[in-house]
Image (cartoon, rainbow, N blue to C red):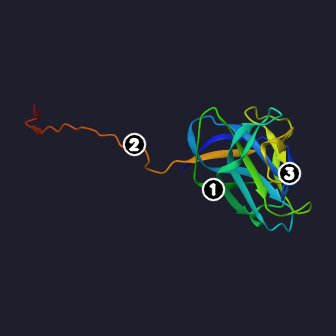
C-alpha cells in the first residue's frame, strides 16, 4: 500500500524541451520524515520519441545566485520507456518506482529531477505545469549545461505537478502483545455461575 506525502496537482500549461542536456527539476519540502519509494509526474512526449526518461530525488544546495537547487548526485531514481508516455499535451500521470527509495527529513528541501539521454528539438518529453506558481514549498528550475552543476540551474516561473509516495507493506504494523484472562462459566437452574 502506498501513502501519498507531498503533492501538487494544479496544472494549466505544459513545458516541453526535456531532452539531452536540457534537464528540469521541481524542488519540494518534505512534510514528514519518511522513505520516499515512488513519484508520479504528469508527462507527455512528442511522437516518435524512443528513449528512456529518468526521474530522481536529489538533495539540494544553495547556489551562487541564492537559489536552492539540486546537487549532482541521485539519492534514488526510476525509469520508464518514453514510448509508454502519451503524445497528448494534456499529459497523463506516470509512476516512477525508486525501489528501496531514500529517507527524507521533515522540513528539508529536496528536488525531483527529470531528464532523457537523447532526443532533440522535435523529440522531447513535456511536463505539465502551473504558470501561477501555486506550489509554495518549492520552485521549478531548468539546466541546459552538461554536467548540471548547481550554478547552472535557472529559476523559471512555473511549478511542475508531482506526487510523492512511501510504500507501507501490508502487515508492517508493530505487533502488540495482549494478555487474556479466562474464566469458567456455567448456566444451570436459571442461574449463571462463573469461576472467581
Residue 81 figure quarter: bottom right
In the image, taking residue 41 as reference, residue 32 lies left or right, namely left
Mark 1 or 3, which is nearer the eye?
3
* Image position, residue 110 (x, y; %): 68, 40
Q: Name the residue under label 1.
A: 97
Residue 70 figure quarter: top right
Crowdedness near tag 1: few (<14), some (14–19) or many (≥20) residues, C-alpha within 10 Å: many
Q: What's the residue at 80%, 49% (across, down)?
A: 148
Residue 111 figure quarter: top right
Whether 83 is drawn above or below 111: the answer is below
Whether 14 is drawn above or below 48: the answer is above
* Image position, residue 130 (x, y; %): 83, 40
Q: Name the residue under label 2.
A: 174
* Image position, residue 169 (x, y; %): 49, 51
Q: Name the N-terminal-most of marks 1 and 3.
A: 1
Crowdedness near tag 2: few (<14), some (14–19) or many (≥20) residues, C-alpha within 10 Å: few
Q: What element carries label 2?
A: loop
Whether 33 is drawn above or below 53: the answer is above
Q: Mark 3 points at which residue?
A: 145
User: Distance from label 1 to label 3 (Cα)?
Assistant: 27 Å
Mark 3–mark 2 contact, CB under 8 Å? no
Amino acid at each position: 500500500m502506498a501513502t501519498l506525502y507531498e503533492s501538487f496537482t494544479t496544472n494549466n500549461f505544459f513545458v516541453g524541451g526535456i531532452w539531452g542536456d536540457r534537464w528540469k527539476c521541481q524542488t519540494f519540502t518534505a512534510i514528514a520524515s519518511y522513505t520516499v519509494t515512488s513519484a508520479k509526474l504528469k508527462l507527455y512526449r512528442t511522437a516518435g520519441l524512443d528513449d528512456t526518461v529518468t526521474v530522481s530525488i536529489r538533495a539540494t544546495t544553495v547556489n551562487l545566485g541564492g537559489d536552492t537547487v539540486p546537487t549532482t548526485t541521485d539519492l534514488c531514481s526510476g525509469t520508464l520507456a518514453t514510448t509508454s508516455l502519451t503524445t497528448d499535451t494534456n499529459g497523463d500521470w506516470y509512476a516512477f518506482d525508486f525501489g528501496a527509495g531514500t529517507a527524507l527529513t521533515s522540513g528539508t528541501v529536496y528536488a525531483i529531477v527529470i531528464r532523457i539521454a537523447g532526443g532533440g528539438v522535435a523529440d522531447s518529453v513535456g511536463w505539465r505545469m502551473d504558470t501561477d506558481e501555486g506550489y509554495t514549498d518549492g520552485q521549478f528550475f531548468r539546466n541546459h549545461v552538461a554536467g548540471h552543476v548547481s550554478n547552472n540551474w535557472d529559476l523559471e516561473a512555473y511549478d511542475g505537478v508531482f506526487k510523492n509516495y512511501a510504500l507501507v507493506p501490508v502487515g508492517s504494523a508493530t505487533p502488540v502483545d495482549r494478555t487474556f484472562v479466562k474464566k469458567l462459566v456455567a448456566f444451570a437452574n436459571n442461574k449463571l455461575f462463573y469461576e472467581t
